[in-house]
Amino acid sequence: MPVQPEITQRDLRSRSKEIMDAVQAGHSFTVTRDGHRIGELIPLRRRRRFVPRSEFTAMSRSAPDISLDSFRADQDALADQQTDDPYGR
């Protein structure tokens, strides 16, 4: 696990644009005050919206087989099979 560079509270205040640009680029920092670690600046994890076809294909190859009969049996066991007249109550 890589060690996060430490920055002082004063550095954060005086170089905030530079530091925030680095965080946006994926870098993390530990913030210190009076020599004590008080917090971390870490980039937010972004969810991917697109999965390349080659990656999807590779993941699909290693996925377990699904038995259609077993899937339907599970659905039948969990689903309410009776149709009630909502106005008949």
Image: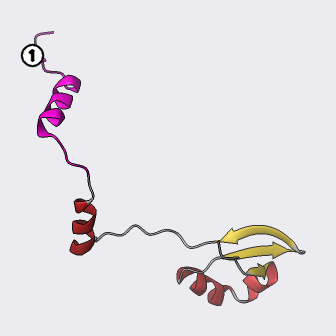
Residue 77 forms part of the magenta stretch = yes
Mark 1: few/some/many CA within 10 Å (<14, 14-19, 20+): few
Give the labeled residue for mark 1: 85
Horizontal side, residue 40 vs residue 68: left or right = right
Horizontal side, residue 13 vs residue 42: left or right = right
Instruction: Residue at 21%, 30% (x, y): give it.
Output: 74
Q: Which residues are magenta?
A: 64-89
Name the residue type under label 1. Asp
Q: Position of residue 19 (x, y in %)?
A: 65, 85
Task: Say if 3 sits above or below 17 in the image.
Answer: above
Residue 77, picture quadrant: top left
Q: Position of residue 57 (x, y in %)?
A: 21, 67
Task: Say if 17 sits above or below 55 in the image.
Answer: below
Residue 78, picture quadrant: top left
Residue 69, picture quadrant: top left
Instruction: Residue at 79%, 78% (x, y): give it.
Output: 9
The secondary element bearing badge 1 is classed as loop
Horizontal side, residue 38 vs residue 88: left or right = right
Instruction: Residue at 61%, 72% (x, y): give it.
Output: 42
Q: Position of residue 41 (x, y in %)?
A: 65, 73
Please state which of residues 17 and 3 is positioned toward the viewer in this rendering: 3
Q: Position of residue 52 (x, y in %)?
A: 25, 74
